[in-house]
Image (cartoon, rainbow, N blue to C red):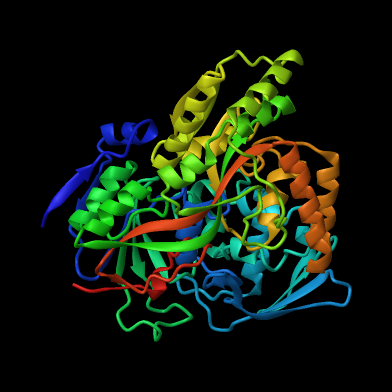
Amino acid sequence: MKRRTFLMGTGAAVTAAAMGNRVVLAQPMPDELVWADDLPGNLDPYSVSDVPMQGYMINVYDTLYVNKENPPKLVPWLATGHSIGDDGLTVTFKLREGVKFHDGSPLTSEDVVWSFGRLLNVKKGPAAAFLPVLDINGITAPDPTTVVFKLKQPYAPFVAAFPLVAILNRRQIEPNIRDNDWGQAWLASNSAGSGCYIPDISTYQPVQQLDMKRNHDHFMGWSHNNSPIETVRRRTIMETTTRVNALIKGDVDCTDSYLPPDQVDRVLASKTATVTKNQTMRVMVLRMNNKKPPFDNRNFRLAMSHAFNYKGFIDGVLKGYAVRNAGPIPVNLWGAPSNLAPYDFNLDTAKDYLAKAKAEGAPVEREIEIQIQQHLAQTTQAAQILQQSLRKIGVNLKIVANLWPQLVSSTAKADTTPDMWAHWVSAYFIDPENWIGQMYDSQFHGTWKASCWYKNDKVDALLREARHLDDQAKRQPLYEEASRIIVADAADIWIYNAIELRGISNRLHGFEFTPIGSGADYRTMSLTS
């Protein structure tokens, strides 16, 4: 059996490799899927909400509702349905009977109550969607298949956000609670789920690799798939070219879903793999720390907004595999203003705003930094395009490589958040709240989504009103007005709404894309020789 060893990149990954933790790949067996996309920073589904966690969570855990298809449709999963009381505050869910966790114990309404209690106490990741409206005392289990939520105030995205919350096996976690940590230290490298695949924790190397075995007893059964995959081997390969080489050689069955167009051509030219192309709801954004000079100056941010070559990046680098997005809400989602004009690339205009910022005392001469995700080539390419333009107007931009977990951690405080950093805001639940609400309402400061540290009282009021209305027709103009204000303030640099590009092996079948999890639902997949 051919075997290849890949070093993981730099920083923490290289340190691990130097200690002997290298990812060793062998040509896959007929019933083994090698999934070469990023693992989350740890395995606790409440630690963070990001694309790697979604790809892990949808296979290992179950949620009350899930999203299927593209455009996404919210469908019952652990729940059979729900009802909303006349007061708009009481939401009652009915659960399926006979669901079991991986250890064989039953999943009941008490597990749902306990899971949400843990979520609200941990106050990380998906908790941001629920903390403003939900209190642990407002969650009850009248019987084993009924859960009742009593909201503090109306919250329109409440049910839409339920795919964020994995239901946990409290019987596994409670014995491992230390110092009132709700089992966070234990669950970071263990699992307590009921999902369609069971992690083999003995294979786990943080951020690098994890094997999973099919859960033959999953409550949804396997009748939909005549040849389900028995073993999934998750392997992280940090460098894009190395990852694509492994796909073409047959060592892995997929790449990540951020495939650069130059690598698309390589994959399509091969005889072993192809590329999936799917319109999604993933907005690429260059964040600007609005609390750090000179980014606390609106004119400086306007200069930055006009200094990015949007067309050059989308048409040149991405070869048109993206749609220009003028603001924070995906252009294909309600709430995005149809007539919102995007910033244009104009260095003369950028110079004018730069001069205004300097006249107002902004320290425009200082070197500024943009941190990129070292394993995602597009973030480097975007930073280089901005760097080249800024050099022409006298702004010195330094590009610094970093890893996603470290970047997320850095955004907890304004003074540790980078001057700028490049990332995407993907679909974690389908509502404007997922994008503009959690990115620009100041109550979310300290999370990676709100890492530009933008503060505008009018915007806060609009977003808070919008999330408490249950009528989309009334919510939409509020989001549109908030979008216009945020864009006029040049809070960030919004580039595009993505067409997701993922390289997959010709032997992989049943890949079904939905923006949540980027199609990483192994239940539907099968392999051929």
Judge from the rendering whether residue 402 lies leftward or rightward of residue 296; answer left or right.
Answer: left
The image position of residue 234, as x and y in percent, is: 34, 56
Quarter of the picture containing the N terminus is bottom left
Relative to the observer, which residue lies in front, 36 or 290? 290
The image position of residue 496, as x and y in percent, is: 55, 49
Judge from the rendering whether residue 522 lies leftward or rightward of residue 178; answer left or right.
Answer: left
The image position of residue 357, as x and y in percent, is: 72, 19
Q: Judge whether residue 478 can be spotted in this image.
A: yes
Relative to the observer, which residue lies in front, 247 or 260? 260
For this orientation, the residue located farthest to the front is 348
**Residue at figure coordinates x 57%, y 76% from the top left:** 77
State whether residue 422 is above or below residue 516: above
For this orientation, the residue located farthest to the right is 87
The answer to which image quadrant residue 393 occupies is: top right
Q: Judge whether residue 296 can be spotted in this image.
A: no
Quarter of the picture containing the C terminus is bottom left
Judge from the rendering whether residue 406 lies leftward or rightward of residue 261; answer left or right.
Answer: right
State whether residue 48 is above or below residue 98: above
**Residue at figure coordinates x 39%, y 40% from the top left:** 377
Counting every numbered tag in the picture gives 0
